[in-house]
Amino acid sequence: MADLFPAALWRPEPSADDGPIRLGHLDSLGKGDLLAWAADRLAGDSHPKAQAFSEWARKVLHEHIFKGEPIGRASGLEPPAGLTLRRAALQAERNRLLHIARAARPEWAGASAARAAQLIDAAWQSYASTAWPRDRKRETAPAAEPAASFWRLCRLEAEGGPRVVGEERIYQLFREADGPSERPEQLTFL
């Protein structure tokens, strides 16, 4: 596959020494060259993941070099809104813990998204203000749910993770999981 980039602009001259490469010693051009080299090598591989990586790496380099897009955004690892990959993973963990807490109690699991959010927010606020000050010294979460999920949520917040932002956000998370409308067994009939 032909090289899409004018190598003379940014790729260093090839050297006869293809000895070990120490990433810590590469400058930006060297790292860009390394990514382009991997894309070129994988372009000839028939595996779908190799093809996808090659295409992705070439797109990243093009966006970064010729359009000036920051490498994080160009790669998709840092979306334009500034949500980093780390932050997205922490938010996903927060959301997962809220769903685990919901499933822990039948009255929460069977409730509408709005009602479950209201109940969980109240229980979460109670745990955070009364039990967490005592439990924060624990090395492991309590054994029982929903206290275990609440402990993990508090720990996540304490370590710089996303906050549990209240009933409205919890409702949005549950509504997305439940689908566009309430479950049929939760509809109120007149």
Image (spheres, grey):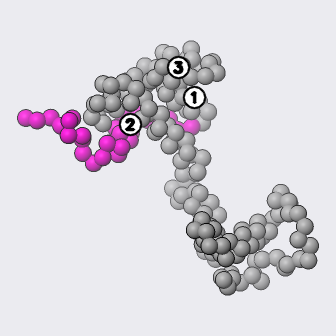
Quarter of the picture containing the C terminus is: top left
Mark 2–mark 3 contact, CB under 8 Å?
A: no
Identify the residue under disc 1: 155
| Mark 2 → mark 3, Cα distance in angstroms | 23 Å
Whole-Å distance between the Cαs marked 1 and 3? 15 Å
Number of disc labels:
3
For the point 24% across and 41% down, the residue is 182
Res 138 seen here: yes
Q: Are marks 1 and 3 in contact (CB under 8 Å)?
A: no
Residue in the image at 76% along x and 77% along y: 10
In the foreground, 161 or 186: 186
Q: Earlier in the sequence, mark 2 or mark 3?
A: 3
* Residue, disc 3: 143
Marks 2/1: CA distance? Answer: 18 Å
Assign a secondary structure to mark 2: helix
Amino acid type at mark 3: Ala
Q: Specify whether 169 is left or right of 137.
A: left
Where residue 4 appears, as percent x and y from the top left, is 65, 82
Estimate how packed mark 1 is, as few (under 14), some (14 to 19) or many (20 or more) residues with alpha carbons within 10 Å: some
Amino acid marked by disc 2: Ile
Counting from the top left corner in percent of width and height, residue 41 is at 71, 73
Helix or strand or loop: what does disc 1 sit on? helix
Q: Tell me: residue 7, above or below residue 37.
A: below
The residue shown at (74%, 72%) is 37
Q: Position of residue 177 (x, y in %)?
A: 36, 43
- Specify the amino acid type for callout 1: Arg
Q: Which residues are magenta?
A: 161-190
Location of mark 2 (residue): 170
> Residue 42 — which label?
none
- Residue 41 left/right relative to 147: right
Q: Residue at x 53, y 59 (%)?
A: 80
